[in-house]
Image (cartoon, rainbow, N blue to C red):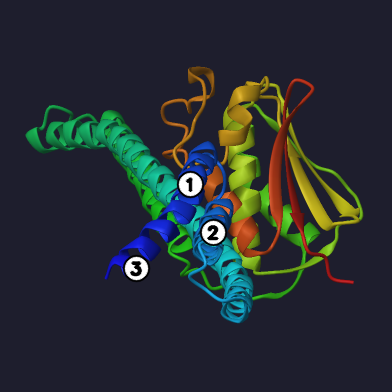
């Protein structure tokens, strides 16, 4: 029993210093990767075992032959442990990074959801209050002359259309975010899509005094879903017209480059602050008050550009914005055919 206790003490005397040094090293590595921590921990474990064995051997408790066998076993076990540990460490690091990124995405999604609810609530409160006031005025007979009644009916129709468009945007955005968007891909002429969108947006542009121009060019043929491509162009045009002052010009151009087909919508909005450019496509983002949609212009809750980004990415394309001259330039890249 005395010999067993003495062996234990000698082994502890050899292993403990290694363990203490390892603890200090791990303390210095507290800001390093998970893989580094796992590698050091395994190395300290193996070295502590090795130091204990060597200390016991030096105390003459192990004969040379047994010592060789033990060292061989320790070396083999150390190699296997370090290999498995490094693999597991890298895997744990990837999982840890994925979990951190998932938490960050969840946090941003929750923040965007709260912001969206706030914007939608704000956008619905005013038209609903106006609809109620006009409906009560018509119901109580406060307004009875034909001209005013017709005007009230026109306003009610306009506010109803605006709220219906908002609901459509919310539904489209929910499909994109839920991954429920299903594209019916076909070969589509981007020039035809642009011409149709410009024809539809021209009356709105004319009503606000904005000149809408689609440049002639070598419009590419792309692989996409025509309804969604039309919505992309329509949303970009609506956004450009909304933020372009009267007598301004909105220009649509397109062509081909090394990345495929592209189209660009340029406006005369006066530019976007550089700090806001990365957030332009975020849900419910409107930027500075100067770019807030005017009352009655059909503006939604800042969903149009978020929908554009979602639809473009669903087509495996990209969309970007930059300040250009006295306005902004939105550029969409899509995979071209041929």
Front: mark 3 or 2: 3
Q: How many numbered discs?
A: 3
Q: What element carries label 2?
A: helix
Image point (63%, 31%), residue name? 277
- Counting from the top left corner in percent of width and height, residue 197 is at 66, 52
Front: mark 1 or 3: 3
Identify residue for label 3: 3
Identify residue for label 1: 17
Q: Can residue 200 be seen in this view?
A: no
Q: Earlier in the sequence, mark 1 or mark 3?
A: 3
| Marks 1 and 3 close (CB-CB < 8 Å) | no
Pick whichever, 284 or 2, lies toward us.
2
Q: Is residue 51 visible?
A: yes
Q: Estimate the spatial distance between the alpha carbons at disc 3 and disc 2, rounded to whole Å.
A: 19 Å
Q: Quadrant of residue 114?
A: top left
Pick whichever, 290 or 8, lies toward us.
8
Instruction: Spot the residue most to the left.
Output: 140
Identify residue for label 2: 51
Tell whether 324 sits left or right of 288.
Answer: right
Q: Is mark 1 on a helix, strand or loop?
A: helix
| Marks 1 and 2 close (CB-CB < 8 Å) | yes
- Counting from the top left corner in percent of width and height, residue 4 is at 33, 69
- Counting from the top left corner in percent of width and height, residue 153 is at 29, 40
Is the residue marked by circle 1 packed among few (<14), some (14-19), or many (20+) residues within 10 Å? few
Residue 244, relative to residue 69: is it above or below? Answer: above
Q: Earlier in the sequence, mark 1 or mark 2?
A: 1
Is the residue marked by circle 2 packed among few (<14), some (14-19), or many (20+) residues within 10 Å? many
Q: Estimate the spatial distance between the alpha carbons at disc 1 and disc 3, rounded to whole Å.
A: 22 Å
């Amino acid at each position: 029993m005395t010999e067993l206790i003495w062996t234990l003490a000698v082994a502890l005397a050899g292993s403990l210093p290694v363990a203490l040094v390892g603890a200090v090293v791990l303390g210095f590595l507290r800001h390093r990767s998970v893989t580094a921590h796992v590698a050091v921990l395994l190395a300290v474990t193996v070295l502590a075992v090795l130091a204990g064995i060597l200390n016991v051997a030096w105390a003459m408790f192990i004969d040379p032959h047994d010592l060789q066998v033990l060292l061989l076993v320790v070396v083999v076990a150390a190699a296997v442990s370090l290999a498995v540990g490094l693999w597991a460490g890298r895997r744990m690091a990837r999982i840890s990074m994925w979990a951190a990124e998932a938490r960050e995405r969840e946090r941003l999604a929750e923040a965007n959801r709260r912001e969206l609810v706030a914007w939608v609530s704000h956008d619905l409160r005013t038209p609903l209050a106006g609809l109620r006031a006009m409906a009560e005025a018509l119901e109580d007979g406060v307004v009875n002359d034909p001209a005013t009644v017709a005007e009230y009916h026109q306003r009610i129709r306009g506010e109803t259309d605006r709220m219906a468009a908002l609901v459509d945007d919310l539904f489209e955005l929910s499909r994109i975010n839920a991954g429920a968007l299903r594209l019916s891909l076909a070969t589509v002429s981007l020039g035809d899509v642009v011409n149709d969108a410009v024809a539809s947006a021209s009356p709105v542009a004319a009503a606000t005094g904005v000149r809408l121009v689609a440049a002639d060019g070598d419009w590419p043929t792309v692989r996409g879903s025509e309804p969604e491509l039309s919505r992309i162009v329509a949303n970009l045009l609506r956004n450009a017209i909304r933020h372009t002052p009267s007598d301004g010009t909105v220009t649509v151009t397109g062509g081909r480059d090394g990345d495929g087909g592209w189209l660009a919508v340029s406006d005369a909005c006066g530019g976007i602050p550089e700090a806001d450019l990365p957030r332009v496509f975020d849900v419910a983002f409107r930027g500075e008050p100067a770019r807030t949609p005017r009352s009655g212009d059909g503006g939604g809750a800042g969903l149009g550009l978020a929908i554009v980004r979602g639809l473009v990415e669903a087509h495996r394309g990209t969309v970007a914005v930059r300040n250009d001259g006295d306005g902004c330039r939105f550029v969409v890249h899509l995979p071209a055919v041929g």
